[in-house]
Structure formats: C-alpha cells, structure tokens
Amino acid sequence: MLGSTMHRMICTLTTCLILATFSTSTIDGQTWNGTRDLLGRLMDGYDRRIRPVRNQSHSVHIRVNFELYTFKEIDEISGTFSVAGNLELIWRDENLSWDPSKHEGVYSLVVPLTEIWYPALLLANPDASDVTIQDDDRMDVRIVFDGSVYLYPTGIIASFCDIRLLYYPFDKQTCGLIFYVRGFSSDEIVLEDGESYLSSNYSGNGAWNLINKTKSVDVLSNASTYFATFTYEIERKWLFAMVNMLFPLVFLSVLNLLVFVLPPDSGERVSFTVTILLAIAVFLTLVGDSLPKVSEPFPVFCYYLLAMLSLSTAMTIVTIVNLRIFHKDPSKKPPALTACLVNVLMCYSCTPKRKKEIYRTTLSQTNETQMNGSTHQSIQSDHVARKTVTWKDVSHAVDIMSILIFVLACLFLNVYFLLFLQAQ
C-alpha cells in the first residue's frame, strides 16, 4: 500500500515537471499568435508603393551580390551570354523593424515578396528573350528585426555580349551582367558594391574557362541611376578546334605534297592531286558549319583555311603544267636559259651512280686519246661533263623546286598563323 502511494507521488511529480517545462518553453519561445500579431502590426498602415525610408529625402541603399552557378551558353552568332546564378539583394526597410524582446523573441520573418516594397531590378544589356529578373508571387523575402530585408532571385540570366572572334579558336571574351533599378534616380536608390563569387556547386562550361571576374558600381554620365556590373573574362578551350579542324587540314596538305614524288609515267598524278583538293574542299565545307558565322571582325582562322585551300589549288595547277612539260616532244630542246637553270639545279641533285658513270666514261676516253695530246683529252672530258638537257629533266627539276617551295609555304602558313593567333 505504501509502495503504490509512493509510486503515484513520483509519477505526479514527474508530470508536473514536464508540464512546467513545456509551459516555460511556450512562454519564452516564438508562438504562432505572437508571430501573427507582429506581422499584423508591421503591415498595419504599410504602403508598398513608397520607398521604405521615413525621411523621403534620404536614399535607400541596396547591396547587390551575385553567386555564379555555371555558364549556360555563349552564342557567337547572336552575341548572347547566359548564366545560371543567384542574385542577393539586401536593403533596410525602416518601417519593418521591431524589438525581439517585446515580441516573444521573434528575430526574423519570412513574408511573400508582394507584401512589401522591393527594388525592381532590370538588366541594362538584356537578351531579347530575358529582360527582367524573376520576381513572381511565389518568391519570399526574409525580414530581420533591425529592418534588413534579404531577397534571393535565382534563375537563368541572358544578356548581350560583344563577342570578338578575331583570334578564334584562341580567343578571350569579356562579358558582363549590368543591373539597375527601374524608375529611381541616383538620389533615391544607391546600389552598393557587393560580392561576385562562385557557388560551391560551380560546374564550369565544357567549351570555356573562367579566368577572371570583377565587379563595379557606377553612375553613367548619360544616366542618373546606379548600375551594378558583374564582369566575367572567359577563354575558349581550343583543343576541340585543333583536333577536329587544324590537324586534319595539315595532314591533308602534307599528303598533297607527295604528288611531286609520284612518277610522272604512272598516270596517277592528276587524279591524286584533284582527289586531295576535293577532300580539302569538302572538309572545309564541314568545318564551316562549326565556325562562327560573323564577318566583322573576320576570324584569322578563316584566312588560314582559305590560304591552305589556295595552296592545294596551286599544287594542282603546278602538277598539270609539269605533266605537260614532261610529255613534250623529245625532239624539241628546251631553251638555253632553261637548260642552264636545270644544269645548276641538277648539280646539287646528282646521284653517286651518275658520278661514277661520268668518271668511267672520262677514264676510257682518256686512255684512248693518250697519244693525241692533252688538248684532245680536255675537249672530250668537257663534252662528257655537259649532259644534254631534255624536257624530262626540266620536269624533274620542277618537281624538286615545287617540293621545296610548297614545303616552305606550308611551314610558313602554319607557324605564322599559330603564332599570330596565340600572340593576342
């Protein structure tokens, strides 16, 4: 009996302690009624059409931050630059402040955006498809007891960007997002210099690298309002263009040089060089679909492609002319100047076999004419040394000269354009 009485007393005391603790936390905590009463007091007589300063001669200071998630797209043709990011707008509303100790410790409230005054932020350099920052009825703002208001509009922002493709595919672009508050002068709304930073989930872009970012707030000379600018300097990743455009073209050009190595009697020279020329033309047609279609400034890389096509065309023309020289009538001798030039060139291209034949011929003729004197020997040796030049010899000399000239031209074009593109 005594044990059951003691057990009841212990249970009663435990229940009282729990109720006392609950009652204390209810009194000291934030209640629904307290929050409702606070919100009702703040909204009583509040007019969202008036700037939130009691002295209307004072300015509203708005701090603008931007958090970048990723570069969505950079369109060279339309000149647009779109990013996914989060704006952070912070200002102080003097009509929305309270003492937390008098309102059950309520330190902050979350209310719909449409219930209070907020700055209508616009892009000064918008794309046609995206003019304003999203501020629909579904957005909320957080209000802190000292009157600070925090707004976080998030989405995809597209702006105009002056894209310069002169040094494509080694080009660097500078694009920016320019924000201003519509309908207010610089005396009424002041945009403060905020922060520009990357999100912890920043994913980058597959075609571009971010190399620098800056921020600034200025009042333009032709406008009476503040502009907050977030600028991003990006660099194109050139490996794709090099592997898919430049290297195949260089390989085709090297292959085209081999036309001067084919024997003229094979009958394959013209078909070979024309096939390579058509391959380069078709390749440039395919490459043209991937190139930016702009004319001002015209990309230097397009001049390079045109130069390589012209070089292949010149090889085709030289091959056809050289075949005509090779098949000229053997009974007709080349002009004296042509024969002289061929002799000079062939002197540097003589093979050891030909030198041995000339030596043996000279030696045999010297033995036969030993009794005729040194004068006759000199005449015979000089006669053997001068070989009669034919049109086939001229064709062979043209092949040697063509290989040297076109190899040097290919090297010059590739080295010059690569150095020029990378020297920006």
Image: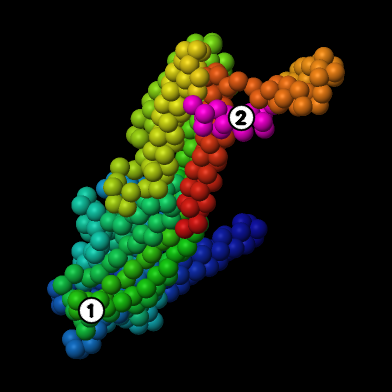
Numbered badge on residue 237: none
Please state the extent of the stretch shown in magenta in the rendering.
Answer: 335-352
Left or right: 265 in relation to 144: right
Q: Position of residue 292 (x, y in %)?
A: 34, 43
Disc 1/disc 2 C-alpha distance (Å): 76 Å
Queried whether the magenta region covers residue 350, the answer comes back as yes
Q: Residue at x 64, y 22 (%)?
A: 387
Up-down relation of residue 2 to residue 71 (above or below):
below
Q: Where does label 1 land, which residue? A: 221
| Nearest the eye: 258 or 415 | 258
Callout 2, which amino acid?
Answer: Asn
Rate crowding at label 2 as few (under 14), some (14 to 19) or many (20 or more) other CA atoms within 10 Å: some
Callout 1, which amino acid?
Answer: Ser
Q: Where does label 2 land, which residue? A: 343
| Nearest the eye: 204 or 247 | 247
| Nearest the eye: 283 or 206 | 283
Q: Residue at x 21, y 84 (%)?
A: 187
Left or right: 220 in relation to 291: left
Q: Regarding mark 1 in the picture, which secondary structure is present there?
A: loop
Left or right: 42 in relation to 314: left
